[in-house]
Amino acid sequence: MQRLIDAVAQASEAILEAESFLWQHPAPGYREWEAHKYLAEKFEELGYHLTCPEDIPGFVTQIETGRPGPCVLVLAELDSLIVPGHPDADAKTGAVHACGHHAQGAALYGLATALMQPGVLDELCGSIRLCMVPAEELIETSWREELRKQGKIHFFGGKVEFMYRGLFDGVDMAFMVHPATMGTDLDFMLEEGSNGCVVKNICYEGVSAHAGGAPHEGVNALYAANLGMQAINALRETFRDEKHVRVHPIITKGGDAVNAIPAQVTMESYVRASDSETIREVNERVNRALAGSAAALGANVVISDRAGYTPLKNDKNLSAAAYEAMVAVAPAERCAILPTWSTGCTDMGDVSSVMPAIHAYVGGAAGTGHGADYYIADRELVCVKSAQFQAALLHILLRNDAACAKDIIAKKDLPFASMADYFDALLALQRDVRAVNYERDGDITLRW
């Protein structure tokens, strides 16, 4: 193990150089072409053969030990957020790595460098698949819906899209490490899991009219949307605390002109919760609230639901192996597996639905995640130490004829028996419905 850890340390200068480049070239999901090009060239210079999707950023590559055994997938995310108020945000796009994905890319590049060093794989068996994946942050969902309609993507999340395209076929387990603002107490940490979600695009339809001269001739879509948001807020006390429900709509278009009654108002939202059944149940109630608010004002509403992310369940046995790797590179008092739950979402949850997987955290970031004050405070920890942890975990999993990895596979407990079952469940969440039907006899029928 130490040989592999040391090989990462020897690449520290190149790792930090990559972190700097990626920080300076942010782009949101499915637009990460500069980062893709930079990292693809770096990997190819190391001697890796890359498999790239034709029309979206990202790639996978595999290194063989030469001995049969399981395949372990290690991931890093390419995309940034959009935070225009951040001092380092791109002046034109507002893009900035305010969640630290750029550090993941640098760490995975460091791991890739170490894995190519002579002798580091001698004690291991099986194979290691490395993945630079796009589009983890679930933003710009209206634009991603347009990509979906054009046939350029099938799902909003990059890992789900890679799974759909077969880029994770043949993998037995997976892990990744995400930077976090954990304060000074911890270097590495794992939780039990995190929420999943449904993505919602909502369009209220009214009737335009002169706002000053004849407002009575219009149907105000903005008022209907406001009423819908109030109805959702009225539902909040019915959400069970232990299910970690979160619903947080935003208005993306509120009208066209101040002197015209708004005829079209668009919204985006998630419905998040800790299990898929609760997501479906709460989403039904939210849709009912949206439909009822439109009908109350004589408007209509088109609801488009798309599969977001499946709840993440960190595999307990893989977590135990990860803790052993944590304490191999950091003091034990600065490493923890916590009995806590994250109310955020990640498409690593989708990976955990079909194979043992974990989404670990490394400290070293500061400020507010997704905020204008986010930055990397400890580059050595968040990049180099992270890569060393990943190297140690690979060694633990694949040494001794992959005894640890094989035990994890034998004890896996997954929500779906196959990838096909998983995708059937995702597609069942998709819907497009015009929610209000006005009958000629004056009756109103709602669908959601």
Image: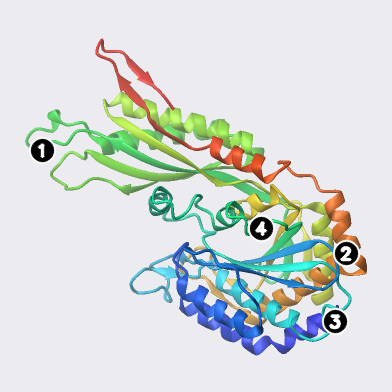
State the residue position of label 3: 2
Label 1 neighbour load within 10 Å: few <14, some 14-19, many 20+: some
The amino acid marked with disc number 3 is Gln
Decide if residue 18 is in sight here: yes
Disc ID at residue 402? 2
Mark 4 to mark 2: distance in Å? 20 Å
Residue 60's image quarter? bottom right
State the residue position of label 4: 168
State the residue position of label 1: 210
Horizontally, is 234 left or right of 254 in the view? Answer: right
The amino acid marked with disc number 1 is His
Disc ID at residue 367? none
Mark 3 to mark 1: distance in Å? 74 Å
Residue placed at 24% from the left, 33% from the top? 206
Task: Locate the C terminus by quadrant.
Answer: top left
Residue 223's image quarter? top left
Q: Earlier in the sequence, mark 4 or mark 2?
A: 4
Give the x, y percent position of residue 366. Answer: 58, 72
| Residue at the extreme top | 441
Decide if residue 249 is in sight here: no
Task: Locate the N terminus by quadrant.
Answer: bottom right
The amino acid marked with disc number 2 is Ala
103 lies above or below 150: below
